Image (cartoon, rainbow, N blue to C red):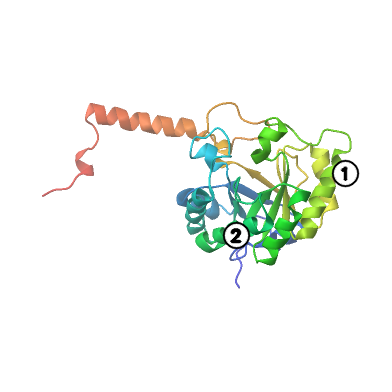
Amino acid sequence: MAENETAPHAAAAPNRYRTVHLQRAKDEGRRFAMLTAYDFQMAQVFDEAGLETILVGDSAANTMMGHATTLPITLDEMIVYAGSVVRGTRRAMVLCDLPFGSYEVSPQQATESAIRLVKETGIHGVKMEGGERYVEHVRMMTDAGVPVMGHIGFTPQSENVLGGYRVQGRSEGAAETMIREATALQDAGAFAVLMEMVPADIARQVDESLRVPTVGIGAGPHTTGQVLVWQDMLGLRAGKMPRFVRQYADLRAVVSEAVSGFHHDVLEGTFPAPEHGFEA
């Protein structure tokens, strides 16, 4: 297959990013980027910008549906968002979160949920929160043909158990524990492991201990990939940002100004102008 050249720090872009390309980045000391997306148009923009991976996050519960946590979103709702994103991509690998309540009961439940996501949306893999206790879940999903990204550190679906949004991995022996959790997921078949809100040195030790790539969010610069929620990264969401977010634009201000201009023109009667209408 023909491949197109990308930025000088990256490998040539394949026709579609797959797990093998993320593994190759790890093996060759390169990195990849990931953003969340929940709809067709933003997925198109991110895909055309060259992102290797897009995550249909259960953060849609917060960013798209207005919930205070990720817990309420359902598998059926994730399927709607994921299908929209897949239809907006040509090159990016699209992953989707298994939402709370869709996998915890048993490996079979997880596998049935993952298969539904793949069959009904066309995603290329799932992400699942949790460590060693989900080893059999990962193994069964992988055996069924669904690539799985693990997720350790702070796991938002467990926020009620963890006592809220708290950095993980600061206790004595944390590095050994996290390495054990990540290695168990890797050995069960996970193609990558995401770490959230973990001290940078702990994340570095985990990354160095794994064969598979790692992805960080609030986990320092040593992971193979980095992910952010797009509304945070592009400045659409109001309020205090997490420490690990860098805002690359202020879309909230841009959109607000544009809407105010439209509102003003409608009230003043200057829109629509003659050039915006049709003649008989």
Query: Whole-percent x and y of residue 201?
Result: 83, 39
Can you tell which mark lies on residue 176? 1
Instruction: Establish if 248 lies above or below 240.
Output: below
Q: Residue at x 80, y 48 (%)?
A: 181
* Drawn side of residue 245 relative to residue 188, left or right: left
Q: Say which of 280 and 42 sits in front.
A: 42
The answer for how far apart the CA atoms under marks 2 and 1 are is: 32 Å
Of the two numbered discs 2 and 1 on the same chain, state the one appearing first in sequence: 2
Q: Disc 2 designates what residue?
A: 112
Q: Residue furthest front?
A: 105
Q: Residue at x 56, y 26 (%)?
A: 239
Find numbered disc 1 in the image and state the secondary structure of the residue it sits on: helix
Residue type beneath disc 1? Glu
Q: Say which of 1 and 245 sits in front.
A: 245
Can you tell which mark lies on residue 40? none
Query: Whole-percent x and y of residue 168?
Result: 77, 35
Query: Whole-percent x and y of residue 210?
Result: 82, 54
* Drawn side of residue 201 relative to residue 107, left or right: right
Visible residue check, residue 192: yes
Q: Residue at x 85, y 45 (%)?
A: 205
Q: Say which of 247 and 7 sits in front.
A: 247
Visible residue check, residue 28: no
Instruction: Establish if 11 lies above or below 164.
Output: below
Residue type beneath disc 2? Glu
